[in-house]
Structures are given as structure tokens and as C-alpha cells.
Image: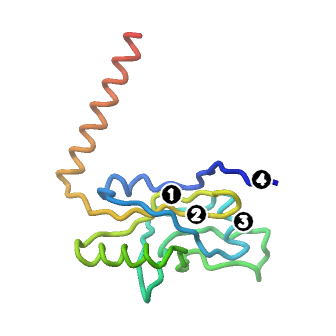
């Protein structure tokens, strides 16, 4: 039986694209327990405060909040904000570590989704935007919105 190839988006981090200029993205698997994956599939995950850190040749997702799954009972629960290991290739981890060290970049989770039967996270290597750059982003978004409104009225 063939697996589904469509990606089901579970959670997005819209603030990350506003606060950071994303230079590169990577797809990584997440190591989850049974109650965690059930909760993720039920869309009870928040990655807005999350960040990725590389330690000892392994990538870890910190501060991602996965709510407890009530059907798991009192003994099958997980800690909601524990660090979760990300599954990346050694070459990708080495590249990320090298880039983060030389250019003061940050790794942030951009999106959590289900691909096939697996939970994946899209992580972005980004540089923090200054407040001036953020204002430019707001101006561009407002201008695009006005253009869209004008085009709808004319049509």
C-alpha cells in the first residue's frame, strides 16, 4: 500500500519569518514518545518560543510546547517543554554548526508537519532582523494588501 505524500501542516511559527531573515532551511525528524505524537496529531503543539541548539554533534529542539494527551492516563504522560532530539544527517549538522559559529546565526523552527506517518519540523537558519528591517517588512506587507484590494475592486 502506498504512503500518502501530502504534508499536513500542524503548526507554523509566523513570528520567526518576521524576526529573522531566513537564509537556509532544513527538514528534520523529531524523536517523540507515544503520547507526544498523539498530541501533535491532535494539533496541540506550539513552536513560537522554540529554538534549535547543536550540542555534541546532535541537534535539539528546545522550548517547543506539546500539550499532554489526556487519553494516555496519569502514568503515560510526557513533560510538555522537554528538549527533543532532531534527526538530521551528520553533514547537515556540521554545516549548521559551522554557519552558526562564523556568522552569529540562529536556528528556529518554522513549521511542524506530518509527512507520510512521520512528524517533521522545518528549521531555518536565520539572522536576526533589526527594528528598521522589521518596519520595512510591515510597510511592504501593507502596500501589498492595498494593491490586492485595488485589484479586487477593479475586477
The answer to which of marks 3 and 4 sits earlier in the sequence is 4
Of the residues under marks 1 and 4, which one precedes in the sequence? 4
Name the residue that disc number 2 marks.
Answer: 120
* Mark 2 in CB contact with mark 1 (< 8 angstroms): no
Q: 32 above or below 20?
A: below
The residue wearing badge 3 is 38
Report the residue marked by disc 1.
111
In terms of sequence position, does the residue under pointer 2 or pointer 4 come before the other? 4
**Decide: marks 2, 3 in contact (CB < 8 A)?**
no
Report the residue at 60% width, 68% height from top: 66
Mark 3–mark 1 distance (CA, rounded to whole Å):
17 Å
Could you give the CA–CA distance between mark 2 and mark 4, rounded to whole angstroms?
19 Å
* 146 versus 101 height, above or below: above
Across and down, in percent, residue 131 comes to 20, 55
Find residue 113 and report its horizontal and vertical position in percent. 59, 57
Using the numbered discs, state the Cα–Cα distance from disc 2 to disc 3 in whole angstroms.
14 Å
Closer to the camera, 154 or 66? 154
As helix, strand or loop, the secondary structure at mark 3 comes to: helix
* Quarter of the picture holding the N terminus: bottom right
Label 1: which secondary element? strand
**Circle number at residue 2:** 4
Instruction: Describe the element under mark 4 as helix, strand or loop.
Output: loop
Amino acid at each position: 500500500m502506498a504512503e500518502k505524500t501530502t504534508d499536513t501542516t500542524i503548526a507554523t511559527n509566523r513570528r520567526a519569518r518576521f524576526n529573522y531573515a531566513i537564509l537556509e532551511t532544513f527538514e528534520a525528524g523529531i524523536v517523540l514518545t507515544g503520547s507526544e505524537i498523539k498530541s501533535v496529531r491532535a494539533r496541540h503543539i506550539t513552536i513560537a518560543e522554540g529554538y534549535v541548539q547543536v550540542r555534541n554533534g546532535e541537534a535539539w529542539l528546545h522550548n517547543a510546547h506539546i500539550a499532554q494527551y489526556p487519553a494516555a492516563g496519569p502514568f503515560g504522560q510526557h513533560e510538555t517543554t522537554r528538549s527533543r532530539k532532531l534527526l538530521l544527517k551528520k553533514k547537515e549538522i556540521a554545516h549548521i554548526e559551522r554557519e552558526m559559529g562564523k556568522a552569529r546565526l540562529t536556528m528556529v523552527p518554522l513549521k511542524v508537519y506530518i509527512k507520510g506517518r512521520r512528524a517533521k519540523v522545518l528549521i531555518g537558519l536565520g539572522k536576526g532582523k533589526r527594528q528598521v528591517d522589521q518596519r520595512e517588512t510591515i510597510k511592504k506587507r501593507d502596500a501589498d494588501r492595498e494593491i490586492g484590494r485595488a485589484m479586487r475592486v477593479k475586477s
